[in-house]
Image: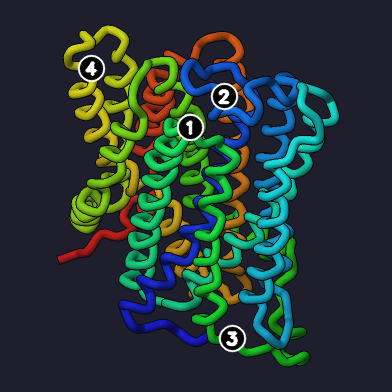
Amino acid sequence: MKKITKKGSLILYACSGLGVNMLNIIVGSYLCSALLVGGFDAHVEHWTYLNRDLVVAGLWAVLILAAKIIDGLIDLPLSHFVDNLNVKWGKRKTAIVMGYIPMIVAYLLLLIPINTSATLANTIWFGALLIVFYTAYTLTMITYYATFAEITDDQKGIMLLSNTKSICDVVYFSLGFALVPAFVSMGMNIRAVALIFLPLSLTMLIPLFTLKEKPTEAAEKKQNKVTFGKSLMFTLSDKPYIYWLCTLFVMNIGLQLFLSGINEYFSTANLDMPFIMPVCFVPVPLTILLYNRIVQKKGLGFGYRYVLVMFSTGMALMGLIKFIPSSIIYVYSIVCALIISFSIGAFFSVTYSVPSKRAADRKELNDDTASSMYFAIQGLFEGASAGLASGVVLVFMKQNGYVSVMTVLVAVVCMIAFCMSFFFPKTISQIGKIDK
């Protein structure tokens, strides 16, 4: 594959996933919650499809967890499929199209219930569509992420892609957690809001015009083909990376619980979500610069602990909102949001930079490794932790009235990850550090 050397082209390429990720956050943070009225105190008729339960809560929790686990498990065979795809148009571009089209179809069908009550048919219908959506989303994004280690082969290029991508993540999170609640508060139903953001997914067309691939000749394909088992075992033998994934698993439980349930939390706390949440995201381009300076001086391990402390502190303080006088509650909330802003962008950056860097390093040791497998296995860990957070913990909290303590639980989980990060191997903790 032809390398991308121009800084502007790399920045544009890093923006490709913005729209598709926006659809993912709408599905995970809003549409899944919109099928149950539990946890909402304000604007219930707009936050939910029809102001009533449309799924059986217990089965729906199981199906969300199953969809997330399948989302993680499917990464492995899909990454192998993408790495060994041989088509004239180019394997990466072809795989992106193969995932993009069914993902859009599933997204649209998720807006249409079979009937107007909490039936088994509705529950299975939405569960099946969720699995299709996550599978197609995974095929699209795992292919895109795999190109990070292919279009640039130096640490500077990888960090530029990762940091720009994390800023794009902040953009779609700002849209998701500021504009979506704003539209809902104005009386627009969540299904209509979901359609408004659908055109953003066209950003995924950027790789189709940017990537310069050549089809692999038959003889070369046979010689260079990487078997699924070989690629899997090679990646799993990377013990530093596996420990990183275990730490990420714990942290992601807290992060996904926050992202999936923040709209319910603000509803129960009687806070203006469109007013407060932008404070978490608008400063992120500046906080990313601070995070980068810390990583360049101290390495990723120190930088990761820094963002975990900031996030846990902000979450713990936000959990005390019910004890704050109403006269200063908004000022207090803004302070909490500012503290959280020092961690949000960095959480996304590390999930791109670590697998990209490890794949590039291991590629130098053995040509048989496949870069997409690193993202695939990370996706497995992230999918399982996200399913546990949004499919089990959050549904339980919604149905039993524990949403008000969600932020405190998030803080506790992230501090466990903080303790685990002290045991990062040097090959992980020193990523990004620039020696004098």
Q: Position of residue 371 (x, y in %)?
A: 56, 67
Q: Which element carries disc 4, helix, strand or loop?
A: helix
- The reply to whether the C-beta atoms of the residues labelled 2 and 4 are less than 8 Å apart is no
**Crowding at mark 1 (Cα within 10 Å: few <14, some 14-19, many 20+):** few
Q: Which residue is mark 2?
A: 45
Chain-order first, disc 1 or disc 3: 1
Q: Which mark is residue 329?
A: 4
Chain-order first, disc 4 or disc 3: 3
Q: Position of residue 187 (x, y in %)?
A: 48, 32
| Residue shown at 81% from the left, 35% from the top | 114
**Crowding at mark 4 (Cα within 10 Å: few <14, some 14-19, many 20+):** some
Q: Quadrant of residue 222?
A: bottom right
235 relative position to 7: left or right: right
Amino acid type assigned to the residue bearing label 4 in the image: Ile
The answer to which of 164 and 124 lies nearer the viewer is 124
Gap in angstroms between the C-alphas marked 2 and 4: 26 Å
Gap in angstroms between the C-alphas marked 4 and 3: 55 Å
Q: Is residue 309 visible?
A: no
Q: Which residue is mark 3?
A: 213
Chain-order first, disc 2 or disc 4: 2
Q: Quadrant of the C terminus?
A: bottom left
Q: Quadrant of residue 235?
A: bottom right
Q: Which residue is mark 1?
A: 187
**Crowding at mark 2 (Cα within 10 Å: few <14, some 14-19, many 20+):** some
The answer to which of 400 and 49 lies nearer the viewer is 49
Q: Quadrant of residue 281?
A: top left
The answer to which of 96 and 279 lies nearer the viewer is 279
